């Protein structure tokens, strides 16, 4: 397979992963009566269950090929990319607000790209600079839009609130957590090329499901008062089960499988740019949910994100193949 063909297929897989991951942003709106911890526990319990069912026919063949190092890697990759990331993100939103959290997490593509510079297929920073700058500009548009909807006092007032500094620290922690996961996961996929990207995703699901069992205890039994727990009607619980199950299948299983395939096809410095698709699709789903079109700043952000990815493609394309890519 030619390099340009691999890049095209990798971009398609990255876009597909972003399309499925973007659905996660709708989950809190669909089941607003449940806490982020409950959503995380429910989603990852379902993820682990479905992963166990799907991988069961091949597990006997896979187990002899997995040693202690692989299981340890799957455990901490699951913690960084799923459990810890989501908990830190939710805590940052509760303590510091959506605007601050969005500004910090929005730098994921830049952080992953910079952290991946020493990986296989990486290109120097200078050719990537235009793509990174456009990505930062797009993130800035979204951040400015969020800040414009805040109070007249602006972000300074948000940072003055009690606990806002801790919220900022949690957002930075989430940023670091997922950046380390993206780079390390790509390297493990390259190291264990004998394992398919889909099997690696399902094995990650097993590890994440085991962690969700531990998270479920404080999330469902120690969160809130008895009156709050009783407020959930049977219909609300069925809706919760349906939402977290759908997200587990579409985002955690299908989306992660596409992401792992993209990680195997694309250079390490390019895979970070693919995270921008998650932001793009999250915006599109949000417009559909709110039944409105994008504002001027949101439209500019979408154009800048698309241009950032295209410039990244050109920077990674082999000589003479940039136009085709």
Image: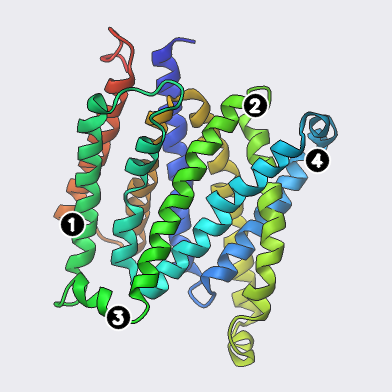
In this rendering, the answer to whether 74 lies above or below 43 is above
Q: Which residue is mark 2?
A: 192
- Under circle 1, the secondary element is loop
In the image, which is nearer the foreground, mark 1 or mark 2? 2
Inter-mark Cα distance, 1 to 2: 45 Å
Do the CB atoms of the residues marked 2 and 4 lie less than 8 Å apart? no
On screen, residue 142 versus residue 208, left or right, reads left
- Under circle 4, the secondary element is helix
Q: Where is residue 297, by image quadrant?
A: bottom left
Q: Which residue is mark 4?
A: 56
In the image, which is nearer the foreground, mark 1 or mark 4? 4
Q: Which residue is mark 1?
A: 295
Image point (25%, 50%), residue name:
139
Q: Where is residue 246, by image quadrant?
A: bottom right
Local packing at callout 1 (Cα closer than 10 Å; few below 14, some 14-19, many 20+) is few
Q: Which residue is mark 3?
A: 161
Q: Spot the residue most to the bottom.
A: 227
């Amino acid at each position: 397979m030619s390099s340009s063909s691999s890049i095209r297929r990798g971009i398609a897989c990255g876009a597909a992963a972003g399309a499925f991951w973007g659905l996660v942003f709708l989950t809190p709106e669909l089941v607003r009566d449940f806490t982020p911890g409950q959503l995380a526990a429910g989603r990852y319990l379902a993820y682990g269950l479905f992963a166990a069912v799907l991988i069961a026919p091949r597990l006997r063949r896979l187990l002899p090929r997995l040693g202690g190092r692989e299981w340890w890697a799957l455990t901490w990759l699951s913690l960084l990319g799923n459990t810890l990331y989501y908990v830190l993100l939710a805590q940052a939103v509760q303590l510091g607000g959506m605007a601050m959290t969005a500004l910090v997490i929005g730098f994921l593509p830049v952080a992953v790209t910079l952290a991946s510079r020493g990986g296989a297929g990486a290109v120097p920073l200078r050719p990537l600079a235009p793509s990174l700058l456009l990505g930062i500009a797009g993130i800035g548009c979204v951040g400015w839009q969020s800040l414009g909807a805040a109070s007249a006092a602006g972000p300074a007032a948000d940072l003055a609130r009690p606990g806002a500094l801790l919220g900022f620290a949690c957002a930075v922690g989430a940023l670091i957590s997922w950046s380390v996961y993206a780079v390390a996961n790509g390297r493990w996929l390259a190291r264990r090329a004998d394992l398919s990207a889909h099997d690696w995703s399902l094995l990650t699901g097993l590890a994440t499901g085991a962690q969700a069992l531990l998270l479920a205890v404080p999330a469902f039994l120690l969160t809130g008062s008895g009156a709050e727990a009783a407020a959930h009607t049977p219909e609300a619980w069925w809706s919760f089960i349906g939402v977290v199950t759908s997200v587990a299948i579409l985002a955690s299983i299908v989306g992660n499988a596409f992401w792992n395939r993209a990680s195997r096809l694309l250079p390490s410095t390019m895979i970070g740019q693919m995270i921008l698709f998650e932001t793009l699709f999250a915006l599109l789903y949000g417009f559909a949910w709110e039944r409105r079109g994008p504002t001027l700043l949101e439209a500019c952000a979408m154009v800048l994100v698309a241009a950032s990815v295209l410039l990244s493609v050109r920077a990674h394309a082999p000589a003479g193949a940039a136009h085709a890519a």
